[in-house]
Image (tube, rainbow, N blue to C red):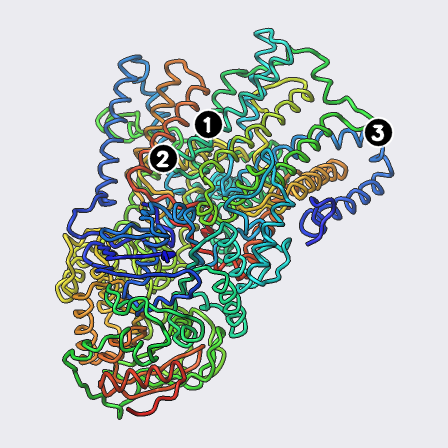
Amino acid sequence: MTTVLGQTPPKNTDTPPTRRRVVGMLTDQRMALGVIVIVLFAGFGIINPMFFNGPFVVYPLLRDTATFTVVGLAQMCALSIGHMNLAVGRMAAVSAMAAGFSFERLHMGLVPGSLIGLAVGALVGAFTGWIIVKSQVNSFVVTLAMDFALLGLVSITYTTFTSAAAFTTKPPGMATLGNGSLGDYCIGNLCGAPNVPLLVFPALVSLIAVQYLYGLTRVGRELLSTGASLRVSRLSGIPSDRRIIQAHTISGLLAGLAGIMLAVASGSFSAAIGSEFMIPSFLGPVLGGTLLVGGAVSVLGTLLGTMLTLVIRQGLSVQGFGLETLNITLGFVLLVALSTQRLRTVTWRPWRRSRA
Amino acid sequence: MKSLWGRIPLHGSGMTLTIVFIFGFVILVVTSGGTLLSHLAISSLLIYLAVPILIGMAQMVVLAVGQMNLAIGAMGGATSALMAVLMTDHGLPVWAAIIAGLACSTALGALNGVLVVLTRLNGFIVTLGTMTMLLGVQYLLVRTFTVDGYPDWLKKAGLQTVVGIPYMFLTAILTAIVVSWYFSRTIAGRRLLATGGNPLAARLSGISNDASVFQAHVISGVLVGIASLVTIASAPGINRSIGGDWLLPSFAAAIIGGVMLTGGAVAVFGTVMAACVLRLVDVARAQYSLDTSWVNFVVGVVVLFTVALSEWRQRRSTLQKMTAEVPE
Amino acid sequence: MTFALEASGLVKEFPGVRALDGVNLTLRPGTIHALLGENGAGKSTLVKIITGVHQADRGELRMAGEVRHFQSPLEAAHAGIGVVHQERNVVPAFTVAENITLQDPPRRMGIVDRDRQRRMASEALVTLGVDIDLDARVGDLSVAQVQLVEIAKALAFSSQVLLLDEPTASLTGSEAEKLFEVLQTLRDQGTAIVFVSHKLEEVFAICDTVTVLRDGVSVLESATLREHSRRQIVDLMVGRELAEQPVRHRTVDRSITAALRLERVNTGLGHRDVDLVVYPGEIYGLYGLVGAGRSELARCLLGLHPVTGGQIVLDGTPVRIRNMEEALHRYRIGYVTEDRKEEGLFFEMPVRHNVAVTVWRRLSRGIRGVSQRAENDVTSRYVDQLDIKVASNQQLVGTLSGGNQQKVSLAKWLAADTQLLIMDEPTVGVDVRTKADFHELILDLADRGLAIVLISSDLPEMIALADRISVMKEYRIVGTIDNNKDYPKMSVQIMDAIHETVHTVA
């Protein structure tokens, strides 16, 4: 039955809720994801034992998972308030650039330089959030414009300050962080190996911090409320404008972290950092159950979603399939996953409505 | 609101952009010492206007129903790749490849439309998905090669002119005229705009909003197909990077051209002029050796500004406040 | 003669609520038929059944003698029912001519036939006796003109029945006059018009027949308006037996500092010289019709719109509230919104989230954040206290019944221990039993010392609850009355203030 005047008939308390609770749905989806990831991992390995090769497959897989999970978390934070951050890639580039600059020109150590990079990322995010709040323009447009702007900024900086369009100074510790593994610090193979990159630690810290934010704190709940309904949040005494800026700040911070992680892993800071972040930034959270319309997120889901896409990528790559098959598969997976999510939550709102 | 020939509004963004274009062009001509007026320079300006105009309209059409098409570049790239490969590896005659290409891009547009309607998903997500898949398809077709094994005359076709105006440019302008006519005169076009303008009122008047959305995506696909055609007729060969830089200019042209993100109207004249202005910016960049980055930055700011302005104006419109909300 | 429209024995139930319980209506061609009733009487449900939005559970609808079952608004429109809703429904970018013919534009081989389109639109406008530029962009027209365009649109497809829902809600006096002229022209041409309105003076000015609904029943069916007095109609609308409810007399201590005082307040929305004083423990009623500016006043008070003049004094201190965050957390003011779906509740969130949203600050334990247990405790406390029927605290609020939803909406303000509570139409869309519960609740809250501002269009409710009532009309207060809870006398006084009629004391 279609309704005309924007009103729906009152719901019946006597019949049990026909929709599963959001929490319940997420749990189911995460379970399914986890199972799929394990099955695929095992499957690819069985088809081709090369897949289990530590240094050439598993290590890079975990390292990429670490980086892309953080990217996914960055997008998830924007999605939590019902926005999107199309500039995750460029924010990553800017942060990496700031860190690289600190290492090369300011001769800072790994930690201080990285902190500067993170601070820059957070600042850019905050600025973006501020523009969104003040101009009341859609986050899609603002972050798209920001993407343009940052692209320019990054290019110009690299051409001005470097000779090879990249900062190549490696502060002490960077190589270890980028290429080291648990095996180097634990006794031999005990900790499950030299296959676990050290870069999983920043990712783990991020996962825990974000889960803490959304699961335990008042701010996290207010962020989700803002995503669920901006109007109701405002009228319930939530400082939504502040929360919007905060969400984008965190998004920028995490994007920056991912950028720095990628630079550390690849060994240099260049303008290309983050150029591949945009699509994966959506895939992880969305596959993991985070709603596009805001109001519900899943940290574990983002991790699992990211793992799924990377296992698929690595698996196909080991089998000899090229980039094209990967892309096709990923696109397909995205569409299927979202169609089923849509069928379950029925929360599509026309994008055209202003979502500032 | 009076208009020229009933189609070109005498005020609005189209007119503003025309003035900006003329102004900018004059400045560039003067500062280039007149070299910009040479036959070659003008030709070049016009040839490289064709694709931006076409893809700007491709985006414009879906924006008009409140959708968006992120797959424009990927669709164009895949279609161009298909045509190139059919001619090179399978020896298809040019006319057959062209038909195949147009059919392909139209089908892709239809696919987008069907997916959006059936899954009730955001156009953003659906076209993000198809874009990802098409990038793969494009790679599958051309790998790391540049496919150029088709007749030379085709490659040069884009550079041919008639009375000094390149054919490709004429193609784009003609297409623009057809699109403009379609949206102002045909029932189907008006229905599409009704859906974009007020889906509820449209529905109550018996218009199928789903059909409108589908139609928009199909038309977008057709326009992308024509853009692919223009591309294959003007590029030395097709590789995996074709179409890679189509997405943002398509939005920029449509948005600066005056198409609101909330849908309900097309601005063919505005989009065409916006594409012209953007092209002029590119010429300026080359002429003054500006950094591409600055240019991108400015474009980004202009887009942001345009949207902010239109949203601000919309908020002030009483009618907008009074229109009934769209139910699920 | 056959009736243009005939409804017999219409019954419509929603879960927990019987919206229509046997409604009859006969509409003759060439008449303007008023449909009256207080909020919740069933008017809007009846309108939705006639226009095809809902289908009746029992009873019949006939047009010109034929039984009809409209499955959708489109079907009703094709059958000849033209509707002009409260909210405008046109395509802003299209011209007047195009909007008028939107349902079926004249065409030739897929191309719009502009000439015929203009002719059709022109004819429709001429029939109305209205002159609007056919090529004007509808988005540029005034609300009144757009409404006329919508009427023309309804006529262009030969509607035999034209239904107007609160048509003068956003019109100025002279625009309304023009509308009435048009309606009378149509009536004289034989159209059957249903005029749904709250405004009695308008109804008496132009309507011929009237049907009054109360509690889902047609208490006056298609009667000749002239044969009834305004007083009689009002009595029928509000019902005398409600006056038999046990009356709870209360005393308010007005010697202490007022909880809220508005002194000559002007607002950016148009309020002028608003004076009112609310004491702790008092229930202060703001009565008025839709569009009077009551909710708007509340929102200005809460900082959502600008206050341009005068003073707002809370507990003796002048304040300037900037937003709801300040209102709640600094000044302990709560606001139970009128529209719980869009403004009051997170429909997709659990009950727990909706109740605790105002108290997370208080529940937050430093680094340990807000525990679910703390949220549950608070929630359970109010679920019990307000007797909210939920399967668990996890239940999504969207799945509760209207009455329980409204209770949740209230619970969050109680949890925040607010001192001043503004309640905007608290019992709209709520079943009778919950309504009674709410009334008890509101009285109890006042007894506990809360200052309550009650905005309501429900006259019996207002008279049963409020200690003092200000009547608002067109963004001004037109009268403030102490409530002696004597239903007959109070209702007359209030209605007089609203309709500015002079009543001889009976």
Q: Quadrant of residue B240?
A: top right
Q: Nearer the viewer, residue B109 or C93?
A: C93
Q: Is residue A109 visible?
A: yes
Which chain is home to disc 3? Answer: B
Residue B134 lies, in percent from the top left, at: 48, 24
Vertically, is A18 above or below A131? above
Evaluate whether residue A251 shows in this view.
no
In the picture as drawn, the residue positioned furthest to the front comes out as C1
Q: Residue at x 31, y 37 (%)?
A: A343
Query: Could you say which disc has been placed on residue A284 in the image?
Result: 2
Q: Secondary structure at mark 1?
A: helix
Figure check: C86 above or below C461: above
Query: Tags 3 and 1 in contact by the CB under 8 Å rule?
Result: no
Pair 1/2: label in front: 1
**In what quadrant of the picture does the N terminus of chain B appear?**
bottom right
Q: Nearer the viewer, mark 2 or mark 3?
A: 3
Q: Chain of mark 2?
A: A
Q: Are marks 2 and 3 in contact (CB under 8 Å)?
A: no
Where does residue C30 sit, x and y in percent of width and height? 44, 63
Look at label 2 and name its amino acid: Gly
Q: Given the image, on which type of amino acid does mark 1 rest?
A: Leu
Residue at which label 3 appears = B39
The Cα–Cα distance between marks 3 and 1, rounded to whole angstroms, is 42 Å
Q: CA distance from mark 1 to mark 2?
A: 24 Å
How far across and down, in percent of the image, does residue C334 sit?
A: 30, 71
Residue at x 73%, y 39% (from the top left corner): B280
For marks 3 and 1, the one nearer the N-term is 3
Image: B88 above or below C273: above
Q: Are marks 1 and 2 on the same chain?
A: no
Left or right: C442 in relation to B113: left
Residue at mark 1: chain = B
Q: Which residue is mark 1?
A: B111
